[in-house]
Amino acid sequence: MPPTDPPEVPGVLSAAEVDATARAIARAQEPSGAIPWFPGGHTDPWDHVESAMALTAAGRYDEAAAAYAWCRRTQRADGSWPAKVVGGRVEDAVTDTNFCAYVAVGVWHHLIATGDEEFAAAMWPVVRAAVDLVLDGQRERGELVWARGPAGWADEALLSGCSSIHQSLRCALALAEYVERPQPDWEVALGRLVHTLRAHPEAFADKDRYSMDWYYPVLGGAVRGRSGLDRIHRRWPDFVVDGLGVRCVADRPWVTGAETCELVLSLDALGRRGPAREMLAAMQHLRESDGSYWTGYVYADGKRWPEERTTWTGAAVVLAADALAGTSATSGIFRGDAPPAALPAGLPVGGSDCGCDAYVTGVPG
């Protein structure tokens, strides 16, 4: 399938401006295919995949394919990747479950954009090994612990990470169906996870100062409909700074571009396209003339924070623009309606399965 044109959001971002952002990401890409946070910076598997997705959404298929080839070459024997790599050297060997699971979202995203069956066949073993590894960290109730290190699995599960893994599992199941390799155990695991995300807030470490814990259950697809709208409205005053974007942390005087764009995607998934467009426009003060984006802005003293222009911030902008443009095959992936069909929802789980009174179907609502 020929590359698509970059998306555009009239009055906010032109196709040429989105292309400039994709080019800024591509300039940071290393010969190995790795996409670090910025030139000379470190690479982590989650932000690497997000940047690859932005390249795909902007029609830069070759650079995106190189990024996924890096995933194939660097995956460890247990299905994981290290949390931090600099110039090909491992600087943090910890296995982050969310980081590792996200390859499934990227692979499904690239496949629906390109229709490349050979790519799907090559990446299926990578996704299968990564998901199997991640599910080793699932607790009986359904949450997944956030990391595994030399001492074994961590004690904590994170709401934002598990919400992201929810989307990863849905994309992994879609890929499994595409390559005709059914994974019923993954369907059960997904059902248990969504039940926990909706019915058991006590399963997760208390991180409610952070905006990611606010919107990620919506972004990851576990909470939608009226429940999702109520969740967003409830803490809007805590995190949204009018005309600037979204705070990363509720009690700190800075806004960050990536969190703002992820809220854009969350609002779009809830059908709130007007506010989503306004949020994307609000964060454009972080844009540089070459299309790159500063990570954040400390509005209390008018300073950039931190001092790098990060690839993943630019990637979040491209993905938000793609969703709002609504013209590509990939534009619905965060809504869960990417072709050829809605993403799988997992098997329904009843409260009797974990001893609670709640019953949660696999259909987001």
Image (tube, rainbow, N blue to C red):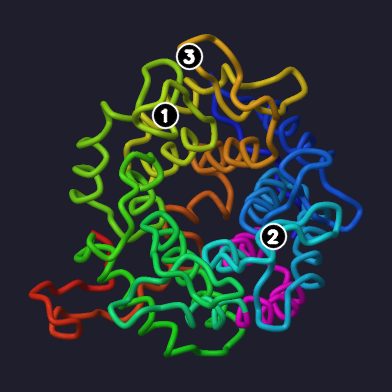
What's the mark number on residue 92? 2
The question of residue 4 being in magenta is answered with no
**Local secondary structure at mark 1:** strand
Q: Residues within 10 Å of mark 3 (few under 14, many from 20)?
A: some
Q: Amino acid at mark 2?
A: Asp
* Residues shaded magenta: 104-129
The image shows residue 131, relative to residue 284, as above or below, that is: below
Q: Position of residue 244 (x, y in %)?
A: 45, 18
Q: Amino acid at mark 1?
A: Arg
What's the mark number on residue 111? none
Q: Residue furthest top?
A: 301
Q: Residue furthest front?
A: 151
Residue under the point 45% across and 68% down: 341
Q: Amino acid at mark 3?
A: Tyr
Q: Residues within 10 Å of mark 2 (few under 14, many from 20)?
A: some
- Mark 3 / mark 1, whichever is N-terminal: 1
Q: Nearer the viewer, mark 2 or mark 1?
A: 2
The image shows residue 189, relative to residue 268, as above or below, that is: below
How much space separates mark 2 and mark 1, taking CA atoms? Answer: 27 Å
How much space separates mark 2 and mark 3, taking CA atoms? Answer: 32 Å
Q: Position of residue 11 (x, y in %)?
A: 53, 19
- Mark 2 / mark 1, whichever is N-terminal: 2
Residue under the point 72% across and 47% down: 55
Q: Which residue is mark 1?
A: 247
Residue under the point 85% across and 59% down: 88
How much space separates mark 3 and mark 1, taking CA atoms? Answer: 10 Å
